[in-house]
Every structure is written in structure tokens, then in C-alpha cells.
Amino acid sequence: LLSAQLRLVVDGKNLLDPEGKNFLPQGFNWQVGRTGPDPGKLTKLLAPKANVVRLVGVFWGDTKPLSTHPNKECMTLHPPNYFNDACFKDLDALVSSATDNGLWVILAVRGEYVAGQDFDSNPGGSIFRNTTLQTMAFAMWRHVAEHYKSWDRIAAYEILSEPRDKTVSADAVRSFYEDGCAAVHAVDGATPCMVGSAPYYKLWNFDERVLIRNSANVIYTFDYFNPDAFVFGTSAIPSYGAASYPCKTLYDGWVDAVCPTWNVSSSVSIPFNATWHAHNFDCFVQKLQNGHNVPVFMNQFEVVHGVPRENGRFAYVQDLLSLARSRSVGFAYWTWAGGNEKGWQHGSAEIVFRWPNGTIMVDKDMLQALFG
């Protein structure tokens, strides 16, 4: 069933806007409960070149024990939809704020526990191993897609963010995503679905195993918290740009999968600069994008406030996005907004910081790195 509303069109590895022009998604992650009022207006004011938000707000199977609070959990155990319609109040307000300001919206399900957080102690709680949970999820997605199919600028339905089950097979993950895409497309056939690799959308598993076989209306997505020791501000990788580090340090946990692509042993140092990003894209992003002619999207990346400018916080982002734009890879920065009573912390990365009294601070330097 095709929607009459404004939608993006998958055209090989490109996305086209409703006028048939190439469209490269560029924007931010919004988190329900953290954006503040009318974030669409503020986003366009501070970052007028932004054109997309990834709305992390369909919380489904995200609490244990299962919460009934719509700001924390949308899953219910009640047929036919297994969805708390009270969640639409906040979701609708944020989708309206985005689309009224010309931004496209990726609707993302976050389900920490259904995605397999407890795969080792409770494998049956992983949706990839539980057909009952799958049936419930597909009913939920049909309901959510029915609700939003008449809204303009829905960019994609992200079926389930970041599979957390580290031992489930790639085939099981793909099978779930195929059925999830079929569920939304039965209701809103014009809107792309969005899927990625297990575990945690890791780039190093971003290959042909993620390809959806029953639909071409799909955007393929990956995280880029790479290397996590740098972007999260730990001492193992203190700086970007002029430094080199052992392959095993830059690809901690993924040495066997990635170091051979450099033709080096794990102890050999390699440069951590723009060349490093280009190698990662060549070997893992472009291989899927160009080899299979599909659109790809970098849905999360950051460098925390605790990494100073002189250690390459902004140079990292500028190099990464120069590369992404040149390769037609869309992106969403993590994250748009947050706040507490203490101010920016070492491990935070939000662009807009909200104090309890409603005043804000803005990371103008990161905005400059992101959009010039």
C-alpha cells in the first residue's frame, strides 16, 4: 500500500526527495524526554543545514520489569497491538516539531531487553529467539506505521535498534528484520525500513549478511563509536590526528576481523587520522553500499566533551563527515540534547545542555565541526 504523503525514495545507493533530487540525511539523534520543548525549531535555528532527526522514542521491551510509564515503555502484553497508545502523545509532539520545521524523522524502536541484553542468562528473552515476541513486535509495528503513514516526512521505520544478542546467528537477525520490514510495508509501503548488523550495529559485521531479501525499500545502518577508547574519552587512545596506535588498540575486541584488512599483525601501529576513517569506510561501508547498490546511514557517532580540542575532538568529526559526505553516507550525531544539575560531564556529548531552570548551553564548536 503506497502512501500519498511526502516520502524518500530508495534509488540504488541513493535516496531521493519528493522532487526526485538526491537527498543525504544529515542531523541528530533526539531522545524522548531529553529534547526540551519544540526541538525542531531549535535544531533549525542552530543547525539550519540539518535535515533529519533519528527519534529514539518507541521504547518497546526496554524495561525490566516491564514498566507502564509511556515515557519509558510502550510495550504492553495486550493484543491486538501490544502498544500503549499513550506513547503517541510525546511521539506525535516530537514528530510534529521536526516535520513542521522541515526535518525528516527516522522512527526508531529501542528495546534493550527484547534486543537481547540478557542473552547469556535469559536467551529466550531475546526477540531473535522468541517467536511470540516477534509476533507481538510485528503487530506493534503495523499499528505504529498505520498511525504515521499519513504524516509527511517520515524518513524510515527503524525496526529494532542495536541487536544486543552477541551469540545469535546473523541469519536469525536478518529473518526478524525481513519480517519486520514486511509488517510495516504491508501498511505503509512507501516508507523505507531501516536495519543493521548484530551486535550493536557494529561496523565490522556490516556486510551482505544484513541484506533484506524480500524488499528493496531498505536503508542499512551502522554505529560509528570507533574507536570507543577515543570517542568515549579514555586514556588508552588519548588523541587523534598525529598519533599512531597498535592495531589491537584501535580495534579492541575485533582484532581478528579487522587487522587483516590492514595486512598487519595486531601489534603493528597504524595511523589514527583521516586515513584510518577512509580505510574503515572502504573495507566495511563501501563494500556493502557499492557492492550491493544500497543506501547506508551512520546513525550514531560522537566524541565526548572530555576530549579536548587539542586532542582532536573536532578534527575527528570534521574528517569523518568530510568522508561521509563524499561517499554519500548520511549521518545523525549522538546526541542533540540532555541535561542535569552539574553541567557538561566528561562522558557527555550533547549539543544542547539544559539546566533544570530551563536555560541552555550550546556546543557551538561541535556544531561548527558538524556543519561548518
Image (spheres, grey):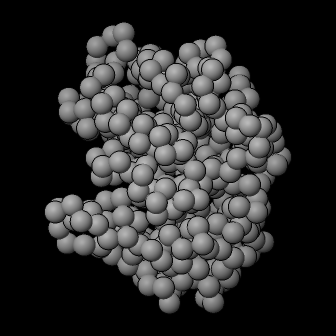
Residue 68: x %, y % from top left? 20, 29
Q: Quadrant of the N terminus?
A: top right
Q: Quadrant of the C terminus?
A: bottom right
Identify whether 270 is placed above or below 39.
Answer: below
- In the rendered structure, the answer to whether residue 349 lies left or right of residue 225 reads left
Identify the residue at image location x=54%, y=59%.
Answer: 48
Identify whether 363 is placed above or below 175.
Answer: below
Residue 340 in view here: no
Identify the residue at image location x=62%, y=85%.
Answer: 241
As drawn, the residue found furthest toward the top would be: 80
- In the rendered structure, the answer to whether residue 349 lies left or right of residue 270 reads left
The quadrant holding residue 370 is: bottom right
Identify the residue at image location x=33%, y=10%.
Answer: 79
Identify the residue at image location x=66%, y=59%.
Answer: 257
Q: Please name whichever residue, 134 or 22, is drawn nearer the observer in this view of the structure.
A: 22
- In the rendered structure, the answer to whether residue 189 lies left or right of residue 106 reads right
Residue 347: x %, y % from top left? 35, 70
Residue 306: x %, y % from top left? 38, 78
The quadrant holding residue 254 is: bottom right
Residue 36 in view here: yes
Identify whether 245 is placed above or below 326.
Answer: below
Q: Please name whichever residue, 97 or 59, is drawn nearer the observer in this view of the structure.
A: 97
Residue 31: x %, y % from top left? 37, 48
